[in-house]
Amino acid sequence: MEEALKRLLEAEARAEKVVEAARDERERSINQAIAEVQMAETRFESGLADLRAPFEREAEDRAAQAVAELTRKFHDRQRDLRELAARHEDEAVAVALALLLDPEA
């Protein structure tokens, strides 16, 4: 009986060592997985700028085109208004001159 008890105690000690080794291995695996995830996050975050760059360039190009188009339209409108003002000025001068020359007309 004593021999069986001794073997049971030895088996329990070996089982505890196996359980402890398994816990250690699990902890190492968890820590390794965490480290790999952190490295993947770092790589992803560092790559975000590269992912965004084409979209930012496209947005800047579109904005530049919109500004150029608005500038062109502004200048066209400004030119049209100046021409209109010059025409009205000529008409106003002609009417004023006619009134000065013939006040009864």
Image: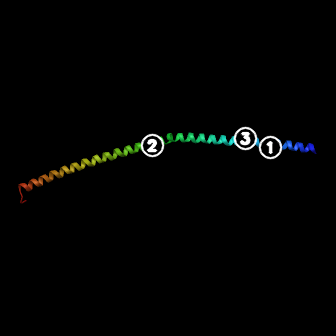
Question: Do the numbered discs 2 and 1 sit on residues whose CB atoms are within 8 Å?
Answer: no
**Residue under circle 2?**
56
The CA span between labels 1 and 3 is 14 Å
Which residue is at 40% across, 44% downward?
A: 62
Question: Residue most toward the bottom?
Answer: 104
Residue 3: x and y in percent read 92, 42
Residue 7: x and y in percent read 88, 42
Which tag is nearer the camera, tag 2 or tag 3? 3
* Label at residue 16: 1
Which residue is at 68% across, 43% downward?
A: 30
| Amino acid type, callout 2 | Glu
> Helix, strand or loop at disc 1?
helix
| Amino acid type, callout 3 | Glu
Image quarter where the C terminus lies is bottom left
Residue 17: x and y in percent read 79, 41
**Residue under circle 3?**
25
Nearest the viewer among 73 and 8 is 8
Which residue is at 71% across, 43% downward?
A: 26
Question: Residue most toward the right?
Answer: 1
| Amino acid type, callout 1 | Glu
Q: Is residue 59 left or right of residue 30?
A: left
Residue 91: x and y in percent read 15, 53
Q: Residues within 10 Å of mark 2 (few under 14, many from 20)?
A: few
Q: Does label 1 or label 3 sit earlier along the sequence?
A: 1
The CA span between labels 2 and 3 is 46 Å
24 versus 87 height, above or below: above
Q: Residues within 10 Å of mark 3 (few under 14, many from 20)?
A: few
Q: Does label 2 or label 3 sit earlier along the sequence?
A: 3
Image quarter where the N terminus lies is top right
Q: Does label 2 or label 1 sit earlier along the sequence?
A: 1
Q: Dividing the picture into quarters, in which one does residue 22 lie?
A: top right
